[in-house]
Amino acid sequence: MINEINESDIKKAEIVAKGLIDSLESQSLAHRENPISDYQQRKQDLLTLKKMLNDNKDEIAKAISQDYGNRSNHETLLLEIFSSIDGINHSLNKLKKWMKVQRRHVDLIVYPGAKNRVIPQPMGVIGMIVPWNFPINLSFAPLTSIFAAGNSAMVKMSENSIALTRLMQKISPDYFPKEKLEWIEETGGVGIEFSKLPFDKILLNGTGSNESSVGKPHSSCTRVGR
């Protein structure tokens, strides 16, 4: 009986891992085909992200309240949705500056005639593990930086945010293709397999998910551009 259960768990983990790997490969391929998105594309991605929040703010608040058992819609709107929209507006205002080539000091005595520059570039596919307590703020704030830097994202939500996750999975394709943004539901063991994926960067925003679902991400970073 124990062996049968173990074999069932192994098969389930293999199915989960296969689905996640396929999603990552799809996003990686799309990124390789267009590795450096221009200003207009990044601006449009941010505007679309903002539109997703504005269009669905009431449904998002209801889903979060359902996950919480009860949560004030005003709290969700003020602390999560409006603050996330403010972050997107800030990024839109700063985007051109952030994309500019940056000059760096060079010791001309040692390197006469040399020039030193930092050229911001996207990293690729970013994985995110999001806790339950402020799920919109802790997903859309990083997504804003991820899209501003020209990346794509796979977002693994908490097992305590099932209603919200399913809502995001439903509405997201109306705004972004899965090759750009995909929402992952925690169904048991997903976090462990998710954290094993060879993302270009992985973000762990707090510890809102329990240890069994999160696993140990191979890296944690808030920078999403080189």
Image (tube, grey):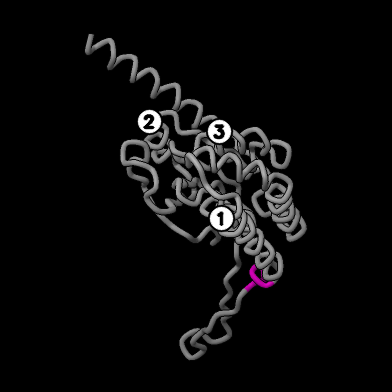
Residue 212 drawn in magenta: no
The stretch of residues the image draws in magenta is 97-101
Amino acid at pointer 2: Gly
Mark 1 element type: helix
Amino acid at pointer 1: Glu
Residue 98 drawn in magenta: yes
Query: What number is the disc on residue 75?
Result: 1
Q: Residue at x 60, y 49 (%)?
A: 73
Gap in Å between the C-alphas at discs 3 and 2? 17 Å
Q: Residue at x 48, y 42 (%)?
A: 68
| Label 2 packing within 10 angstroms: few (<14), some (14-19), many (20+) | some
Asked whether disc 1 touches disc 3, contact meaning CB atoms under 8 Å apart, the reply is no
Asked whether disc 3 touches disc 2, contact meaning CB atoms under 8 Å apart, the reply is no
Q: Is residue 105 left or right of residue 85?
A: left
Question: Which badge, 1 or 2, is on the more N-terminal residue?
Answer: 1
Gap in Å between the C-alphas at discs 1 and 2? 31 Å
The foreground one among 118 and 186 is 186
Query: What number is the disc on residue 23?
Result: 3
Q: Main secondary structure of the magenta part?
A: helix
Question: Label 2, on which residue?
Answer: 189
Q: Report x, y in % for residue 224.
A: 53, 58
| Label 3 packing within 10 angstroms: few (<14), some (14-19), many (20+) | some
Q: Report x, y in % for residue 175.
A: 72, 42
Asked whether disc 1 touches disc 2, contact meaning CB atoms under 8 Å apart, the reply is no
Q: Residue at x 33, y 19 (%)?
A: 9
Rendered image quadrant of residue 81:
bottom right
Q: Is residue 68 left or right of residue 140?
A: left
